[in-house]
Image (cartoon, coloured by chain):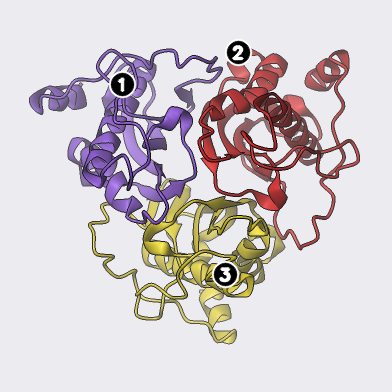
Chain colours: A red, B yellow, C purple
Amino acid sequence: MRIEAKLREMGLTLPAKPAELGMPLPFSWVRVRGNRAYASGHGALNPDGSLAGPLGKVGAEVTVEQAYESARQTALAMLSSLQQALGDLDRVTAWLAVRGMVNTAPGFTKTPAVINGFSDLILELYGPEAGQHARSAVGMAELPLGIPVEIEAEVEIAPEA
Amino acid sequence: MRIEAKLREMGLTLPAKPAELGMPLPFSWVRVRGNRAYASGHGALNPDGSLAGPLGKVGAEVTVEQAYESARQTALAMLSSLQQALGDLDRVTAWLAVRGMVNTAPGFTKTPAVINGFSDLILELYGPEAGQHARSAVGMAELPLGIPVEIEAEVEIAPEA
Amino acid sequence: MRIEAKLREMGLTLPAKPAELGMPLPFSWVRVRGNRAYASGHGALNPDGSLAGPLGKVGAEVTVEQAYESARQTALAMLSSLQQALGDLDRVTAWLAVRGMVNTAPGFTKTPAVINGFSDLILELYGPEAGQHARSAVGMAELPLGIPVEIEAEVEIAPEA
C-alpha cells in the first residue's frame, strides 16, 4: 500500500468506478491475466465516477493546460480501476506501454504536452524504474462522449501476496 | 472445436481470408508467438473475403446500427484469421485487449456503442471468463479504403494440442 | 550484430537519439522488461536526431511516396532506439505487433501503402520468420508536431548475451 500512502500524502483521492455512460459497456476496465494487467481506455472522472469536464476538443474548447490536468485525472481514474482489480497498487511492478489519445481540434499538434499529465503523475508515484513506460501521444478525430483525453496502458503485475 | 460448434449453432460462418486490397499487405493477419497471438487491424468481410459494405463514416454514410453490425462482422473476420493461424479457436484461452477504431464523421461520439458489436459476440462465444477484455473505442480520421470499423486484439493462447 | 552488418551492407545508418522537441518528453523511447521491448511512437529522423521532413498531412502536403519513405525512416529511428536500449539488434528475436499511424488529409485512405515503408524494411532486415508482425495502419486527426507518420511496436527479445 506504498502507492496508496503516497497518494494520500499528495492529497490525491481516487475516483469511484466510472458511472454508466448511457450505453452498455461490455468490457473490463482492467483485464488481469498472469503477470499482466491491461487497462482499457480511460478518461478523467469526478470523485463520484461521473465524467469530469471540460469536454471537447483540445486546441478549441479545451486548453492545453486543462487537457494536461485531464490526463492527470485520467491517471487517477486508471489507478482507481487498477486498485479495484488488483487490491493493492504496489502489485504494479512495472509500467510498460501507455497509449495517449487526444481529442484534437484541427492543427493542434502538441499532443505530447497533454499526455505528460499522465506520465508525470505515474513517474512521481512509481519512480523512474517501475514508472518508466513507452508511450505514444496522438490526435484522434473523436473520443467517446467528447472527452478530451483517453489513455490505455499495459502494466506488469506481481502475483497476489 | 467448442467455439466452432457454437458458431454453427448460432448460424454464423467465418469469411474467407481477406482478399487483395489493391496494394501489397506485407504483414500477418495474426502473429503467433509463445502464449500470445496478436491480431492485426481487421475490418468486416463478405463470405468470399472481400470487404463488406457499407463503407464510409459512421454518423454520416453509415448508421450506428450498421456500424455495430460491421463490428460484429469484424469479430467474425478476426476469428477466421485466428482459426487459420491456430487450427482451433478453443486455443484462445483468454481475450486480453481489444482496440476498436471507428471511422467517425465530425461529432460522432458514440464509438463505444459501435465496438459493442465486437465485444458482445466475443463474450457470447467465449463466456464472461475467457471472453472478457480490456478495450478502447475511439474515433479515427480515416481507415483503410474507407471501412467504417477496424479492430485489433491481443489474446492468450494455449500450446498446440 | 548481424542486423547491424546488414544495415551497413544496405548503406543505411541509424539516426541519433531524437532531439528535444520543445517540450518535456517524460517517457522511454524503448521500455525493456523480461522478454519484451515496447517501442514508443516514433517518427522519421534526420541523421542528427532532428525531425525529418516533409511534415504535414499525407494526401495533401505529403505524397504517398514521401510518406512511404517517412515510414521507412521511422523504422530506422526505432531501430536506433532499440539498438541503444538492447546493445545489439540481434536481440530482437521476433517482431510482434506494429501500430502504424498516418497523419491523413480528408479522404486519404491508402494508409496501408504508407506503413509498408516500415514493414518492408523490417522484413528485409529480419526475414520472414523473425520479421513478421501483426499490424494496423490507420488515419489520425493529428500527430505530434505535424509529423506525417508515427509508429509504435512490441517485440520479443532474447536475454542479454
Which image quadrant for residue A77? top right
Callout 2: helix, strand or loop? Answer: helix
Residues A7 and B100: in front is B100
Q: Which mark is residue C80?
A: 1
x and y, in percent, of residue C15 in the image? 27, 18
What chain does badge 2 belong to? A
Give the chain letter at badge 1: C
How many labels, in total?
3
Q: Residues within 10 Å of mark 2 (few under 14, many from 20)?
A: few
Which quarter of the rendering shows the C terminus of chain A? top right
Residue receiving disc 3: B67
Foreground residue, C57 or C33? C57
Name the mark nearer the viewer: 3 or 1: 3
> Horizontally, is A79 left or right of B49 in the view?
right
Q: Mark 3 is on which residue type?
A: Ala
Q: Distance between the residues labelled 3 and 2?
A: 42 Å
Q: Distance between the residues labelled 1 and 2?
A: 22 Å
Residue type at mark 2 is Pro
Residue at image point 19% right, 20% down: C13
